[in-house]
């Protein structure tokens, strides 16, 4: 599943390729993917110019004047760009945006979990507030105090809590394991057991791991490839994710894999001990 670094990499790729392009025609093959009114989607988009591709958490934002197309890739959504007269037949191609430069942006999604919503620009903030999407994981947006407050009263296990996007946006199964390893926190630790200093360490680990992921163009793991087949290199720098049985780079103990809230979870049993309370 693409996490923030992969989505950010897709955003940057799309910005280079489609910013400033006018959409001349649209077609949708898998209509259930469109979560706003389909008729409006098909009627509004032709004639609109993509002024910018933005991002909020793991959502891509195609800004189109007074409206914005919000796209979530979920498990395996991908964008491809083809010359309009040479779009291959693709079984999992679900949406087609014909552009004024003779190319067509195609949305592909094998699992069909991805979504698109057309929103008024003015409703964007409310949309993300309703979904309880937390702040962006950068030093300015992601303030320590509210993070500390949320954790201080929480009985939730940290990994699933960090995955639910309410504390901070962008973490998925790979990066959350990396963050907890870096901060030396057990994935099943309870929020309220963390000292003020550990919370500060955790916040900095989230900011730095996701920033490193962005810098390395995301990770290319399993079937996930970003737009145009560009491949990130973050997978070469992971410390625990997918490293079951290998030596911890910090202490040498073997990395273990457990199931936590249904997710495969990698951690070092020596560096990341559960706090005794
Ligand atoms: Zn270790």
Image (cartoon, rainbow, N blue to C red):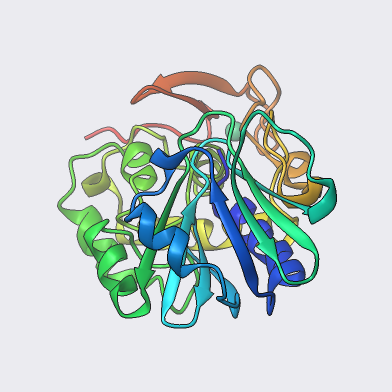
Using the image, determine if residue 223 lies above or below residue 120: above
Whether residue 236 is visible here, answered yes or no, is: yes
Report the side of 17 relative to 184 (left or right).
right
Q: Position of residue 79 (x, y in %)?
A: 66, 50
Foreground: 31 or 131? 31
Q: Position of residue 25 (x, y in %)?
A: 61, 62
Q: Position of residue 181 (x, y in %)?
A: 54, 41
Foreground: 185 or 59? 59
Whether residue 168 is visible here, answered yes or no, is: no
Using the image, determine if residue 122 lies above or below residue 112: below
Quadrant in which residue 201 is drawn: bottom left
Residue found 57% across the figure and 57% down from its top: 26
Residue found 69% across the figure and 40% down from its top: 238
Foreground: 181 or 37? 37
Report the side of 100 relative to 4 (left or right).
right
Dividing the image into 4 quarters, which one contains the N terminus?
top right
Q: Quadrant of ligand 1?
A: top right
Residue found 69% across the figure and 28% down from its top: 222
Dividing the image into 4 quarters, which one contains the C terminus?
top left
Q: Position of residue 256 (x, y in %)?
A: 55, 20
Report the side of 156 relative to 202 (left or right).
left
């Amino acid at each position: 599943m693409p996490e923030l670094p992969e989505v950010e990499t897709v955003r940057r790729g799309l910005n280079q390729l489609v910013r400033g392009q006018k959409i001349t025609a649209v077609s949708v093959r898998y209509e259930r993917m469109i979560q706003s009114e389909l008729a409006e989607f098909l009627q509004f988009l032709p004639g609109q110019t993509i002024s910018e591709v933005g991002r909020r958490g793991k959502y891509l934002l195609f800004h189109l004047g007074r409206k914005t197309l919000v796209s979530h890739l979920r498990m395996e959504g991908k964008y491809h760009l083809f010359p309009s007269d040479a779009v291959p037949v693709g079984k999992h191609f679900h949406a087609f945006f014909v552009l004024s430069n003779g190319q067509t942006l195609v949305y592909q999604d094998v699992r069909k979990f991805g979504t698109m919503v057309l929103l008024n620009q003015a409703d964007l903030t409310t949309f993300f507030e309703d979904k309880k999407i937390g702040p962006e994981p950068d030093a300015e947006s992601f303030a320590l105090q509210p993070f500390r407050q949320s954790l201080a009263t929480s009985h939730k296990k940290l990994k699933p809590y960090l995955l639910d996007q309410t504390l901070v946006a962008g973490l998925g199964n790979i990066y959350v394991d990396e963050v907890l390893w870096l901060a030396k926190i057990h994935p099943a630790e309870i929020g309220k057991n963390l000292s003020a200093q550990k919370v500060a360490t955790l916040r900095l680990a989230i900011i730095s791991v996701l920033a490193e992921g962005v810098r390395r163009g995301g990770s290319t793991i399993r079937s996930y490839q970003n737009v145009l087949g560009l491949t990130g290199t973050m997978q070469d720098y992971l410390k625990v994710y997918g490293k079951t049985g290998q030596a911890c780079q910090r202490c040498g103990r073997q990395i273990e894999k457990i199931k936590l809230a249904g997710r495969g979870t990698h951690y070092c049993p020596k560096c990341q001990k559960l706090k005794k309370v």
